[in-house]
Image (tube, helix red, strand yellow):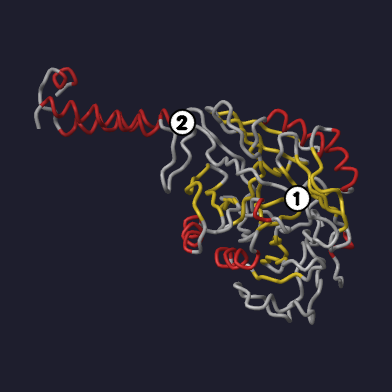
């Protein structure tokens, strides 16, 4: 290795080290090196809510809602998912309050 | 061998090369120790509690973080801790000192118009494994896994229908399963064209138990559950679904959906769905903040948590 190539190597090492930091990116498996937050996503337009109203249930059910024995309890016919056993009660939200 | 000799053209020894490499690494480390983007841990003190499939965080992506803080602070009594690093503006929203979500104003080009939205974060034990499962079952990677000191590791995806969501492997554990208080997130729904196949996707990725929910309107509604708690529902978009974009929608618990919806309008937001009685007997509504980010309002009482029949 001659002096010129060694000098080039050293400069390259410095440049690489500086570049890794200045880029502010993230490596797979790495930790945020501190230039910003990179998880913000705007979504496509198209949020419309017409057609909602009575009958269009969207919130959580009460525990045991519609189960067991309800005709829909076994899941939709030919469902792509694996429905929970019909013997299981419909889950709901946690009941425990903080500090209780 | 000295630096002077070296830079005068002499051939360096291994020792001097090692010294230079060390200096290079130190220079990099010093630069890295500059401004840092540190998010608070989800849980303090940290715990070993894990609830895969639970919605554990939400980030608002907005073009106006100042207006967003004014709106949500007035509406829910949230307070904020700002983090400004580089060209990122982020603020942690808190309710009674507890972190409830993040507000983020990303840098965008002049004239760009985008849909502001709340990004939903679902708990996973291993982000890399979740990424593999999501891709294997038809999802799309929008942001590869990234780590944030104190927060954990997270990534952003779209489900096969296009609904955007994130996963988070919290480094401090997951929040315990408490009933949300007014002003906290209490519920999440995926509005989708195909609840059936979407349910299979989420079940394969997160291991949910899936329950079909009887509905009065004849459309398909599905419940996702882990730990014997309801985590989210999948709802079929109403009739003209082709014009609508599938998405996650998160709900904040409120004492009165009617009063809160009125306050949303007074603060410059909009009511997208007027309060109506949902299947649990309480009112729900959908509103949008002044920038247009939608979210839900949900009334829930202690009585609603008890065993009940349709």
Q: Residue at x 85, y 56 (%)?
A: B300
In the rendered structure, find residue B33 and report the number of the disc placed on it.
Answer: 2
The quadrant holding residue B92 is: top right
What is the crowding at mark 1: few (fewer than 14 residues within 10 Å), some, or many (at least 20)? some
Residue assigned mark 1: A49
Whole-percent x and y of residue B197? Answer: 60, 67
Whole-percent x and y of residue B244? Answer: 67, 51
Query: Between A6 and B246, which is closer to the camera in this rendering?
Result: B246
Q: Mark 1 and mark 2: span between their CA atoms?
A: 47 Å
Query: Between B128 and B109, which is closer to the camera in this rendering?
Result: B109
Q: Is residue B190 above or below residue B225?
A: above
The quadrant holding residue B4 is: top left
Q: Is residue B10 above or below residue B124?
A: above
Q: Quadrant of the N terminus of chain B?
A: top left
Q: Residue at x 82, y 32 (%)?
A: B267
Q: Is residue B44 left or right of residue B129?
A: right
Q: Is residue A40 above or below residue B129?
A: above
What is the crowding at mark 2: few (fewer than 14 residues within 10 Å), some, or many (at least 20)? few
Q: Residue at x 58, y 31 (%)?
A: B112
In the rendered structure, find residue B171 and report the number of the disc placed on it.
Answer: none
Whole-percent x and y of residue B132? Answer: 46, 60
């Amino acid at each position: 290795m001659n002096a010129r190539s060694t000098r080039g190597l050293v400069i390259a090492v410095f440049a690489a080290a500086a570049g890794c930091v200045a880029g502010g990116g993230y490596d797979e498996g790495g930790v945020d090196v501190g230039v910003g937050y990179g998880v913000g996503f705007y979504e496509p337009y198209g949020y419309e809510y017409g057609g909602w109203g009575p009958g269009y249930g969207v919130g959580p059910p009460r525990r045991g809602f519609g189960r067991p024995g309800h005709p829909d309890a076994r899941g939709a016919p030919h469902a792509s998912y694996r429905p929970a056993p019909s013997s299981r009660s419909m889950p709901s939200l946690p009941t425990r309050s903080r500090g209780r | 061998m000295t630096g002077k000799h070296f830079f005068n053209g002499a051939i360096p020894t291994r020792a001097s090369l090692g010294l230079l490499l060390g200096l290079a690494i130190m220079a990099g480390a010093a630069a890295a120790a500059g401004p840092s983007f540190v998010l608070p841990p989800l849980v303090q003190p940290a715990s070993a509690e894990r609830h895969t499939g639970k919605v554990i965080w939400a980030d608002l992506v907005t073009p106006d973080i100042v207006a967003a803080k004014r709106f949500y602070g007035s509406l829910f009594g949230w307070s904020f801790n700002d983090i400004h690093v580089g060209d990122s503006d982020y603020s942690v929203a808190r309710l009674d000192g507890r972190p409830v979500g993040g507000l983020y104003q990303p840098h965008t080009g002049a004239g760009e118009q985008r849909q502001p939205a709340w990004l939903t974060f679902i708990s996973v034990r291993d982000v890399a494994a979740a990424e593999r499962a999501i891709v294997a079952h038809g999802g799309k990677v929008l942001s590869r896994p990234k780590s944030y000191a104190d927060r954990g590791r997270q990534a952003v995806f779209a489900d096969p229908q296009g609904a955007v969501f994130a996963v988070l492997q919290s480094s401090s554990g997951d929040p315990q399963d408490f009933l949300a208080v007014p002003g906290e997130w209490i519920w999440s729904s995926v509005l989708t064209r195909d609840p059936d196949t979407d349910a299979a996707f989420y079940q394969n990725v997160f291991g949910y138990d899936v329950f079909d929910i009887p509905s009065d309107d004849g459309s398909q509604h599905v419940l996702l559950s882990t730990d014997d708690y309801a985590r989210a529902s999948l709802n079929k978009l109403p009739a003209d679904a082709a014009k609508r974009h599938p998405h996650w929608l998160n709900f904040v618990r409120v004492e009165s959906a009617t009063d809160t919806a009125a306050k949303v309008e007074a603060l410059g937001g909009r009511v997208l769905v007027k309060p109506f009685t949902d299947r649990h007997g309480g009112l729900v509504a959908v509103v949008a903040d002044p920038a247009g980010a939608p979210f839900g309002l949900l009334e829930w009482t202690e009585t609603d948590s008890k065993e009940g029949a349709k």
